[in-house]
Structure formats: structure tokens, C-alpha cells
Amino acid sequence: MSDALAVVALTLVGVAGTAVAWTFDPARQAVLSSVFGVLLAVLFTVLQAPDVALSQIGVGAALVPLMVVLTVRRIRRGPR
Amino acid sequence: MSGRARLVVFVLGAAGLAVAFVFALGGMPPFGGSEHPYRDLAVAAALRHVTPNVVSSVNFDQRALDTLGEETILLGSVIGAAALLRLVGHEKERPERAGGRLPDAIGLGCYLLLPVTLLIGLDVVAHGHLTPGGGFQGGVVLATGLHLLYLAGRYRSLERLRPLAWYEFGEGASATAFVGVGLAGLAAGGSFLANVLPLGSFRELLSAGTVPVLNIVVGCAVATGAVVLLAQFLEQAIRITGGAGPGSSG
């Protein structure tokens, strides 16, 4: 049962990771990488690593995408 | 580098990785097996120090020195980001614009979630030695939770709740406190970061010796560090104009 769950979670992580890599607009990429971060947290939970899953949700799903979005916004606004 | 050279570098690197990967897979124990020599040692050591969350025991007791290293990395990256994103050249702060209107539901949701998130963050930090979580996870929850105010469209109120100088001080002070706990262990227990406080009894809030203390110290360091880090990015994205943009080389 838990093996099947792990396979499903791992597959979802693979699909989401590929989607992030194949997205070329950085703003979209940030949002997708947030989804990827949540899926990775699910995988860690299935593999009985809740501590890592918690860090992953905080950093991978919230902190890093927010920094990327803010950076993209600043760069797009240009030197005005 | 030309496209051809890039391809050669990639093929060499990929081939090396593939060989190393196959060898690594060959030497790995089977998935889900029952033989874990490191687990047997770590769990026994955690139980000796009355720490039910073995991961916290590894992070803040058995390998606390590694965590000090990670703390220093965080401190270094915060200082680096603050130095790189400071006001330079033609950049100047502009007054905040009124900002776009948000649907009321989003604002209300953010205000309702703010206290809940902060409470969860404190809970995760305080119970790090008992349940999954700890200073790092709780600190990130606290720091990102605070930014719900920005999502609610109130950058001004975020700035008021976030006197940056205090957070900068907190980041430095908690990094120092970590070293202080380590030196106290050296003085009282004979080794740096030795667990010298009374261990208490299982599942008590005050147990596991220095583990909850270091959890709180790291929680402060990560929360203040992440707030200072995000503040640099927010300032650049919202308040600062002028300076070098795309296309100009300066």
C-alpha cells in the first residue's frame, strides 16, 4: 500500500519537475515550482520524513517562489 | 563557450554521472529494507537524551555542530543579499502608491490566517523536540506567515509590524546565542555544544536538555533571517526606482 503511494507521489514529482523545466517564462515557472514544492512535500511525508516535508513546504512552496516572483517584477519594471 | 564545446562538456559530465550513479545504485540496500545501522545508533542516542523526535536529536544534539554551520550559511546569505540589494547609484526610494484594489475576500482571508499561521509557527518551534518540526521549519512558517500582510495588500502595515533594524539585530543575536549555548556546553560538559541541561522525562515540554533551547534560538535566527532577506527583495520590487535595469551595463 505505502509502496504504491510512494510510486504515485514519485511519479507526480517527476511530472511536475519536468513541467517546471519545460516552462520558459520565469513568472509561470515560479508558480509551477511552488506546486512542485508541495508535491515534493507529499512525497517526503509518504516516505515518513515529516520534518523534511515541513521545511519543503515552507522553503520550496512559499519562500523561493516569492523571491523569484519579486525578482521578475523588479527586472520587468526596468530602470524607470 | 561555443555550442560544440558545451556539448562536449555536457556529454563528459553526463557520462561520468551515469557511471557513478550505476555504481551507487548497485551498492544501495533494497528499498524499504529493515537493516539501518545508522538508525539503530541514532535512535538509541536520542532515547538516551530523552528526545522523542530523533531528527531533532540528530540536528540539535548529536550533530549540533553541523546545524551551527547551516546557521552561519544562512547568516552569510542574508548579509550577502542585503549588501547586493542596497541602494546604489541612481536608485532612490519612492513613496508607496495607493496600490491596486484587492477582492475583500482575499484581504479578509489573509487577516484571518495571519494569527493562525503565527501560532502554528510558534507551536512548531516549541515542540520541535517532541513532534515533527523544529526551529528551522517553525522559523520559516513565522517569516512567511508575516508576509500574509503583503498579500492582503498592506505593504505599509507589513513595514509597521516589521521594524527591520530589530530583525537584523535578532538575526545576529540568535547566531551569537547558538555559539553561546555551545560554549556553555564546553564549560559545563567538556565538549562544544554538549547537552548539559537536565534531560527531564519523556513527552514533557521541558525535556531533552539543550534541544528545545537550540530550537528556539534557530527559530529566531531563521524567522528574522528570512524576514530580512525577503525585505530586501520587497524593497527592490516595490519601493526602489532608478539604477541599472535590463539593457544598461552598470
Image: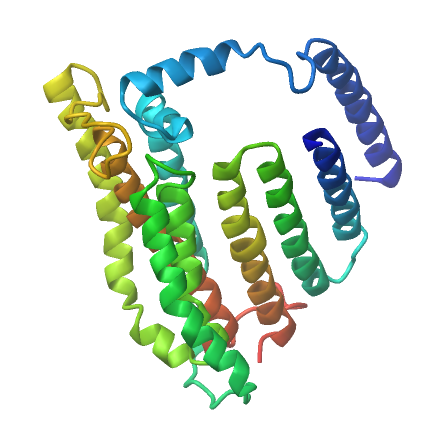
Instruction: Say above or below: A46 vs B140.
Output: above
Where is residue A43 shown, x and y percent of the image?
64, 39
The answer to whether residue A53 of the structure is visible from this angle is: yes
Where is residue A58 shown, x and y percent of the image?
50, 51
Give the residue furthest to the front: A1
Which residue is painted at 15% across and 27% down in the image?
B197
Give the residue furthest to the right: B4
Instruction: Judge left or right: residue B167 versus residue A20.
Output: left
The answer to whether residue B90 of the structure is visible from this angle is: no
Where is residue B237 shown, x and y percent of the image?
52, 71
Instruction: Say above or below: A7 vs A21.
Output: above
Image quadrant in which you'd find residue B73: top left
Instruction: Say above or below: B242 vs B191.
Output: below
Give the residue furthest to the left: B188
Task: Indicate the colouring scheme.
Answer: rainbow
Which residue is painted at 46% across and 74% down in the image?
B110
Where is residue B203 shown, x and y percent of the image?
28, 33
Instruction: Judge left or right: residue B36 versus residue B164.
Output: right
Give the number of callouts.
0
Which residue is painted at 53% across and 34% down in the image?
A49
Which residue is painted at 70% across and 34% down in the image?
A6
Instruction: Judge left or right: residue B230 versus residue B198.
Output: right
Q: Which quarter shows the N terminus of chain B?
A: top right
**Along the line of sight, which residue is nearer the eye, B218 or A5?**
A5
Q: Which quarter shows the C terminus of chain B?
A: bottom right
Image quadrant in which you'd find residue A27: bottom right
**Along the line of sight, which residue is nearer the eye, A33 or B234?**
A33
Image quadrant in which you'd find residue A70: bottom right
